[in-house]
Image (cartoon, rainbow, N blue to C red):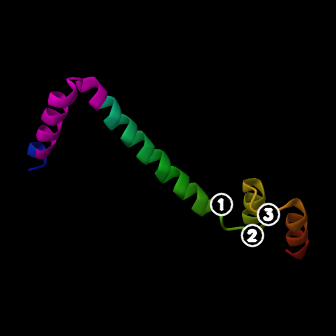
Amino acid sequence: MVNIILTLIVAYYLIRTGDLFKLIRKIRRFIVDFIVSLKQETNEIQTADDPLDILKLRFAKGEISAEEFEKMKTSL
């Protein structure tokens, strides 16, 4: 069933554009982007353990000012 669906998608794309290599590049890019997004999510989860790391991350993103950063850092 999956083979039929994939064949129909490829056939439709070839009829519309006539460029199979463009389709292959799009699929490859989709897979790479998906893997990269998974790695980024796991990295964010792993670094969110330490409160000081969370504070540094918020400061780096610009969510808090330098004064707020120092005040929160001393309270930790």
Q: According to the image, label 2 marks what residue?
A: 51
Q: Which of disc 3 and disc 1 is earlier in sequence? A: 1
Look at the picture and state if 27 lies above or below 63.
above
Q: What type is the residue that disc 3 sits on?
A: Ile
**How many residues crowd around disc 2 within 10 Å: few (fewer than 14), some, or many (20 or more)?**
few
Residue corresponding to mark 3: 64
- Label placed on residue 47: 1
Q: Position of residue 17 (x, y in %)?
A: 22, 27
Per the rendered image, the range of residues in magenta is: 5-23
Foreground: disc 1 or disc 3: 3
Question: Tag 2, which secondary structure?
Answer: helix
Residue at the far front: name it.
16
**Residue at figure coordinates x 53%, y 57% from the top left:** 41
Which residue is at 42% across, 40% downward?
32
For mark 3, does the 10 Å Cα neighbourhood hold few (<14), some (14 to 19), or many (20 or more) residues?
Answer: some
Q: Quadrant of residue 7?
A: top left
- Quick check: 18 left or right of 51? left
User: Which amino acid, mark 1?
Assistant: Thr
| Residue 19 within the segment the image draws in magenta | yes
Q: Kindly indicate the quadrant of the structure image that contains residue 59.
A: bottom right
Say which element carries label 1. helix
